[in-house]
């Protein structure tokens, strides 16, 4: 199974963000984690996080450490699949060859890799950006000691910068960056400092944990060899405890150390989640690594204060509705009203019951967009129910038992798309 291609789930995300660092992102770059739907050749694609929640504006460090799906897909959409595949091939993930089949789900494990190759790719990060081809047999000697075979291992090849490999490893070894996604205590906690990432695929067919210290790399795959799904076994539940136990034994005789900081890196105080220098109202200042020359120069204005001292935030347009629903005070709440998409039917959390006496039962869906809306689209569970020109839409939807998600997507002038969503439930009794 070490040579069998399997879908790696989120275990590929470190290499997406490695590509992002090469394209001008930093570990402090703010990424959007709010509802979004992408138009793809196979239809609408609406990514969701594992916890079924959205987290607003998050630094790249937290997006990777907590393995949030939505920021990852948005990042892949911004970079393009070819840029991601190029760096994946560079680090040794050479089974990702069906380029015409890959879409935005690639960063969530839509391709297939061999466990051995995934370990090789993580070794690139452990080696400070250098690729070393793996081998099994070092040499073969006969009874007299004569060498019959000796591996002619090739010299390491630099495939990523030392600085970017260090930053990705620093994020993957940061327990604080994992808390929003995994909580404070996880099977990823070890007695030695280690960088680690989990992965889980659709229907729980595969789960993974891969990680490293400066001296050892361990990649664990858990699944059924016949590709049958498991029963809700995720990477954090299945592979992570095995990985932890193996890495503990594998590093028992090695020193507990971490690579020296590359000289081209600098550390600066920034204000999360903006990635900018802290302003006077910033409540969340923290230290972050930057390649020299990429550190922030501007001071954030994301945080403010009301006359009575309460903190307010000024998020991007796409995150304002999320911020209001999450209970944040907005610097200018009238702006949020002006740009928000409103779903008026159904109510959030509504429960509907199917009547056995009626043959056809439908739910009325209604939504409105802000001023200047070019078109408005209604979707249920990702399927388009209605698309109209202008800022108001209504449609009927045949009741189907289960929990459902309705989404309204408004397209504004210039192609900007904003959305709102909520869930409701349909029961039979």
Image: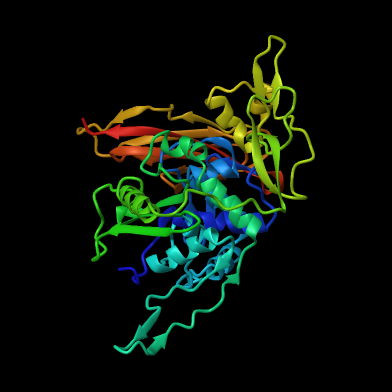
Q: Position of residue 65 (x, y in %)?
A: 50, 44
Q: Nearer the viewer, residue 251 or 105?
A: 251
Q: Nearer the viewer, residue 325 or 273?
A: 273
Q: Is residue 36 visible?
A: no
Q: Position of residue 342 (x, y in %)?
A: 55, 30
Judge whether 86 appears above or below 181 on screen. Answer: below
Q: Is residue 265 visible?
A: yes
Question: Is 81 left, or right, of 6 in this rendering?
Answer: right
Q: Residue furthest right?
A: 297
Judge whether 157 appears above or below 206 on screen. Answer: below
Visual colour scheme: rainbow
Task: Give the number of marks.
Answer: 0
Q: Position of residue 138 (x, y in %)?
A: 40, 78
Question: Is 344 left, or right, of 77 in this rendering?
Answer: left
Question: Dividing the image into 4 quarters, which one contains the N terminus?
Answer: bottom left
Q: Residue at x 64, y 59 (%)?
A: 162
Judge whether 282 appears above or below 261 on screen. Answer: above
Q: Quadrant of residue 85?
A: bottom right
Q: Residue furthest top?
A: 308
Q: Position of residue 214 (x, y in %)?
A: 50, 56
Q: Residue at x 30, y 57 (%)?
A: 222
Question: Is 46 left, or right, of 203 in this rendering?
Answer: right
Judge whether 5 appears above or below 187 on screen. Answer: below
Q: Residue at x 49, y 64 (%)?
A: 121
Q: Nearer the viewer, residue 407 or 147?
A: 147
Question: Dividing the image into 4 quarters, which one contains the C terminus?
Answer: top left
Q: Residue furthest front?
A: 144
């Amino acid at each position: 199974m070490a040579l069998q291609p399997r879908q790696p789930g989120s275990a590929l995300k470190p290499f997406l963000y490695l590509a992002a660092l090469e394209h001008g992102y930093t570990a402090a770059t703010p990424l959007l984690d709010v509802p979004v739907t992408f138009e793809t050749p196979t239809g609408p694609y609406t990514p969701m996080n594992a916890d079924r929640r959205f987290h607003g504006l998050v630094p790249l460090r937290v997006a990777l450490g907590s393995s949030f799906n939505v920021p990852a897909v948005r990042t892949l959409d911004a970079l393009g699949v070819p840029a991601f595949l190029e760096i994946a091939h560079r680090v040794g993930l050479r089974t990702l060859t069906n380029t015409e089949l890959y879409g935005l789900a690639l960063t969530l494990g839509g391709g297939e890799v061999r466990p051995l190759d995934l370990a090789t790719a993580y070794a690139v990060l452990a080696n400070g950006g250098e690729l070393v081809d793996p081998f099994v047999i070092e040499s073969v000697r006969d009874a007299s000691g004569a060498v019959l075979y000796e591996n002619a291992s090739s010299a390491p090849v630099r495939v990523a910068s030392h600085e970017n490999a260090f930053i990705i490893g620093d994020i993957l070894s940061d327990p604080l960056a994992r808390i929003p996604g995994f909580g404070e205590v996880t099977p990823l906690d070890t007695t030695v400092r280690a960088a680690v990432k989990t992965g889980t695929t659709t229907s729980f067919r595969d789960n993974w944990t891969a990680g490293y210290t400066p001296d050892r790399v361990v990649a664990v795959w858990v699944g059924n060899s016949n590709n049958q799904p498991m029963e809700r076994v995720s990477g954090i539940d299945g592979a992570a405890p095995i990985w932890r136990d193996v890495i503990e034994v594998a590093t028992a005789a090695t020193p507990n150390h971490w690579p020296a900081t590359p000289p081209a890196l600098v550390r600066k105080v920034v204000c999360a989640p903006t990635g900018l220098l802290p302003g006077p109202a910033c409540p969340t200042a923290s230290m972050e690594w930057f390649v020299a020359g990429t550190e922030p120069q501007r001071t954030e204005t994301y945080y403010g204060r009301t006359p009575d001292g309460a903190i307010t935030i000024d998020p991007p347009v796409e995150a304002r509705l999320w911020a209001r629903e999450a209970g944040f005070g907005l610097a200018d709440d009238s702006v949020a009203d002006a740009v928000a998409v409103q779903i008026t039917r159904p109510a959030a959390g509504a429960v509907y019951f199917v009547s056995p006496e009626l043959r056809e039962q439908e739910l009325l869906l209604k939504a409105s967009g802000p001023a200047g809306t070019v078109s408005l689209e209604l979707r249920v569970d990702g399927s388009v129910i209605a698309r109209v020109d202008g800022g108001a839409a209504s449609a009927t939807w045949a009741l189907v038992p289960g929990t459902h998600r309705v989404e309204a997507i408004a397209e504004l002038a210039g192609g900007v798309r904003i959305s709102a969503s909520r869930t409701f439930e349909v029961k039979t009794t």
